[in-house]
Image (cartoon, helix red, strand yellow):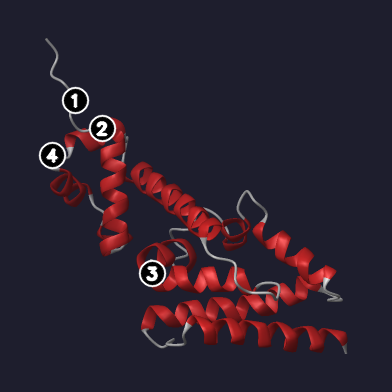
């Protein structure tokens, strides 16, 4: 009778993903995943041909996690790009290691930052269309200016240099939107 497999591909992926969230992507090694899953490395390499394949799966799971996080984030801002910015900055604050994997560590990036942000729902396109409907003459340029600001603020959370409240952040995003829009109208 064949021995029953007790360690599944889902268990391995879930373990590696949890380790990435807690310790960072660089700490996801076959031995550490095996130890955390309570098995040898053999089941890992039974379902994944190598660690690159497991890392790709962890990356894809992190990208999906970000999309779910963004779609569930409360929409409180009125200005275009404010809700996108609020969710992105909160994600950096709450999910530091996943944020680093997806948006900071370029060597691990499988998708562009734009692809991750836009997602299947067209998040960025939606915000650009909101800006266009609000009278912005060049919503693409506005997005670039807002994005540089938003990404900078999110990265500052990683180092502990961003300590604004959500209310202050939303106000700053709204003020930035107005300022950048006014610049583009000149």
Vertical arrangement, residue 44 with respect to residue 137, above or below: above
Residue at image position (70%, 82%) is 177
Side of 124 where 67 appears, left or right: left
Sequence order check, earlier mark of 3 and 4? 4
Residue bearing the label numbered 1: 5
How far apart are the alpha carbons under marks 3 and 4? 30 Å
Locate residue 57: give its quadrant. Answer: top left
Badge 2 element: loop
Q: CA distance from mark 1 to mark 2?
A: 7 Å
Residue at x 58%, y 59% (from the top left corner): 112
Q: Which mark is residue 8?
A: 2
The quarter in which the N terminus is drawn is top left
Q: Residues within 10 Å of mark 2 (few under 14, many from 20)?
A: few
Q: Position of residue 97 (x, y in %)?
A: 35, 65
Helix, strand or loop at mark 4:
loop
Q: Is residue 90 left or right of residue 25?
A: right
How far, Cα to Cα, is label 3 from label 1?
Answer: 35 Å
When the figure is inspected, residue 41 is found, relative to residue 82, above or below; the finding is above
Where in the figure is residue 139, as x and y percent of width and height? 79, 72
Mark 4: give few (<14), some (14-19) or many (20+) Cα within 10 Å: some
Give the residue at mark 3.
94
How far apart marks 4 and 2 lie (CA) works out to: 11 Å
């Amino acid at each position: 009778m064949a021995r029953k497999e007790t360690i599944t591909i889902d268990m391995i992926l879930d373990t590696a993903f949890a380790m990435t969230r807690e310790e960072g992507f660089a700490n996801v090694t076959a031995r550490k995943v095996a130890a955390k899953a309570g098995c040898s490395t053999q089941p890992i390499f039974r379902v994944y041909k190598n660690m690159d394949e497991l890392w790709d799966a962890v990356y894809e799971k992190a990208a999906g996690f970000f999309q779910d996080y963004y779609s569930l984030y409360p929409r409180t801002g009125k200005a275009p790009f404010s809700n996108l910015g609020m969710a992105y900055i909160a994600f950096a604050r709450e999910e530091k290691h996943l944020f680093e994997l997806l948006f900071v560590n370029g060597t691990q990036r499988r998708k562009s930052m734009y692809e991750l942000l836009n997602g299947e729902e067209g998040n960025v396109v939606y915000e650009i269309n909101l800006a266009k409907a609000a009278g912005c003459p060049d919503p693409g340029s506005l997005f670039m200016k807002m994005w540089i600001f938003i990404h900078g603020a999110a990265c500052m959370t990683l180092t502990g240099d961003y300590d604004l409240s959500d209310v202050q952040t939303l106000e700053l995003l709204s003020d930035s939107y107005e300022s950048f829009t006014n610049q583009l109208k000149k």
